[in-house]
Image (spheres, grey):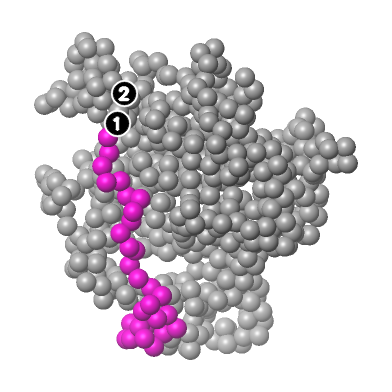
């Protein structure tokens, strides 16, 4: 997992770029190769054409415009925003501390349109030109590298006494110890060769490329057609600019000048409760249109009630809680997220987010974002997990045989998940806060699933790819016996009733066996329209 950003910024004097790479213990043993890949990518950037860079720039620019236009850039809590604003005010000045990086500026004054904001390719290549091994500090943090440094300290004690630059150090403020050492000559030579010729490295030009054009980046943003025209005319956030004045008519028809922030609409408009649109013996569809915040953002939740997710059927035919099943379901969800992280990367870059997790109430899949493709993303996640077919395969090509192993259940995907999970559980009682332990013990005392951390560890130690594949197959087959899992589908935000119904139909078609797909959904009765009281958890709906 790689992330990059500015670590320190010295106003008028440059900045320090930080690239952070999270590795497993096995991956850390190859840290020199990881650094080589990073340097190779920088070399590729320097050799990219202006046309290639402009394509990537347009996607980045669109997402910047979306975040600013939809007032999503500074939506964090005040106590978090305060520190960020103070830092940005120091770096960019008070007049640009909000907009810098999100709104195009020309020189010190004025601004230009997004359409004319071209990628400064020469500036970019100049910056990338500094990403070389001679201008780099590699910081390794982990148990194994620390142990190796301690061993080297013993073996090279005399050499370190002669050259005091290297060895064990202590920073003066908090007294934290660290080791400082030079890079081995052979490793340094390989890194230097990256700048001279990319073909000499282990990374070939076919394995590294610029991002392709992102299909998930919004093409256009507009408010839902189910909203009244006068409300849609308000624009994003419920406020529209009218010359130098801000007009807020809140859909009432009475326009008046106001001097309140966008959030003023939040305080005056009553939030619509979720409405039950459809129900049948396979599930229910809930819908809530955003008539308050007026942002082109959609949030989707699909809850699959699957008995075999965390239970086993006993001899009497009754479902009883099973620790191994609960642990295996959590591992399945985690392995799936890791396996498709690269496939869904474009969606993440485009501001779409998704998750899949095993809960006491069922398998929960969520997706949210600013583009209508969020519904396609949600269906892709569900279909890939449920059928075990590789991500991106068209629905009509998804075939699941009884012997098939889901594509995300491989040693490469499951191994790191098991390693992380076991490490977390084994250190649970020595690495958490007291409030976490209080919640854990109260859940054990009051919850239906009363199992100890040691039970989870034992179940996880016995987990294998074959056992996880059997559990996945058992879940799907048990649900198929009942015509598919019971589905709770909740569509909220900038999504119409028609779009919600289409999604609900598609979801049922994915999880139901083909012989049951002819059963039509039924419209919800009026007395159930208010069955969901605002604030009530979706997990406890029984009406």
Say few, some or many: other residues with alpha carbon within 10 Å of mark 1 (under 14 / 14 to 19 / 20 or more).
many
Q: Of residues 431 and 204, which is closer to you in this image?
A: 204
- Can you name the residue that lies furthest to the right here? 315
List the residue tagged with mark 1. 223
Q: Is residue 326 left or right of residue 99?
A: right
Q: Is residue 433 visible?
A: no
Q: Is residue 385 visible?
A: yes
Mark 2 residue element? loop
Do callouts 2 and 1 mark residues in contact (Cβ within 8 Å)?
Answer: yes
The correct choice, above or below, for 20 with respect to 362 in the image is: below
- Toward the viewer: 84 or 438? 438
* Distance Cα–Cα, label 2 vs label 1: 8 Å
Horizontal side of residue 128 vs 316, given as left or right: left
Residue 442 image point, x, y percent: 75, 32
Residue drawn at (49%, 78%), measured in percent from left and top?
A: 33
Q: Nearer the viewer, residue 230 or 375?
A: 375
- Residue 339 falls in image quadrant: bottom right
Q: What segment is highlighted magenta in the picture?
A: 194-223
Whether residue 195 is in magenta: the answer is yes
Give percent across and percent down for residue 543: 62, 19
Q: Position of residue 535 (x, y in %)?
A: 54, 22
Position of residue 201 relative to residue 365, above or below, is below
Q: Which residue is mark 2?
A: 227
Q: Residue at x 72, y 56 (%)?
A: 470
Helix, strand or loop: magenta stretch: loop
Residue 338 quadrant: bottom right
């Amino acid at each position: 997992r790689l992330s990059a950003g500015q670590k320190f910024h010295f106003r008028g004097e440059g900045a320090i770029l930080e690239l952070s790479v999270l590795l497993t213990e096995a991956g850390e043993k190859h840290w020199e190769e990881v650094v080589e890949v990073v340097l190779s990518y920088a070399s590729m950037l320097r050799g990219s054409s202006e046309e290639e860079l402009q394509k990537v720039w347009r996607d980045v620019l669109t997402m910047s415009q979306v975040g600013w236009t939809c007032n999503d850039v500074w939506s964090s809590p005040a106590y978090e925003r305060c520190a960020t604003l103070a830092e940005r005010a120091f770096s960019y000045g008070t007049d640009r501390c909000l907009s810098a990086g999100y709104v195009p500026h020309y020189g010190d004054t004025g601004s230009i349109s997004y359409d004319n904001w071209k990628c400064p390719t020469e500036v970019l290549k100049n910056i990338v030109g500094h990403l070389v091994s001679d201008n780099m500090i590699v910081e390794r943090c982990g148990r194994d590298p620390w142990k190796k440094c301690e061993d080297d300290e013993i073996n090279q004690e005399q050499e370190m006494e002669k050259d005091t630059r290297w060895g064990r150090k202590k920073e003066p403020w908090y007294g934290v110890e660290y080791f400082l050492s030079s890079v081995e000559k052979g490793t340094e030579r390989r890194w230097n060769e990256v700048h001279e010729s990319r073909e000499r490295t282990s990374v070939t030009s076919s394995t590294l490329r610029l991002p392709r054009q992102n299909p998930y980046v919004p093409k256009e943003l507009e408010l839902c057609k189910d909203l009244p025209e006068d409300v849609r005319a308000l624009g994003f956030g419920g406020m529209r600019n009218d010359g130098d004045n801000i007009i807020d008519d809140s859909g009432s028809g009475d326009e008046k000048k106001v001097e309140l922030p966008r959030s003023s609409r939040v305080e005056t408009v009553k939030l619509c409760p979720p409405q039950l649109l459809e129900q049948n013996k396979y599930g229910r569809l809930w819908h809530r249109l955003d008539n308050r915040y007026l942002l082109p953002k959609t949030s989707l939740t699909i809850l699959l009630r699957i008995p075999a997710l965390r239970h086993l059927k006993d001899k009497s035919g009754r479902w009883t809680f099973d620790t191994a099943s609960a642990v295996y379901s959590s591992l399945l969800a985690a392995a799936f997220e890791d396996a498709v992280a690269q496939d869904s990367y474009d969606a993440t870059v485009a501001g779409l987010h998704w998750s899949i997790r095993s809960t006491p109430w069922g398998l929960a899949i969520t997706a949210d974002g600013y583009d209508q493709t969020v519904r396609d993303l949600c269906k892709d996640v569900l279909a890939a997990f449920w059928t075990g077919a590789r991500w991106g395969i068209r629905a009509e090509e998804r075939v699941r045989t009884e012997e098939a192993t889901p594509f995300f259940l491989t040693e490469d995907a499951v191994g790191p998940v098991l390693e992380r999970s076991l490490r977390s559980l084994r250190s649970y009682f020595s690495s958490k806060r007291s409030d976490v332990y209080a919640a854990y013990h109260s859940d054990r005392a009051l919850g239906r699933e009363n199992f100890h951390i040691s039970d989870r560890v034992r179940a996880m130690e016995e987990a294998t790819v074959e056992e996880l594949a059997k559990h996945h197959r058992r879940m799907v087959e048990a649900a198929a016996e009942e015509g598919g899992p019971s589905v709770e589908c909740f569509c909220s935000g900038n999504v119409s009733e028609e779009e919600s119904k289409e999604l609900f139909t598609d979801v049922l078609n994915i999880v139901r066996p083909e012989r049951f797909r002819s059963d039509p959904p039924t419209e919800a009765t009026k007395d159930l329209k208010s069955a969901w009281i605002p604030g009530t958890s979706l997990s406890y709906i029984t009406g």
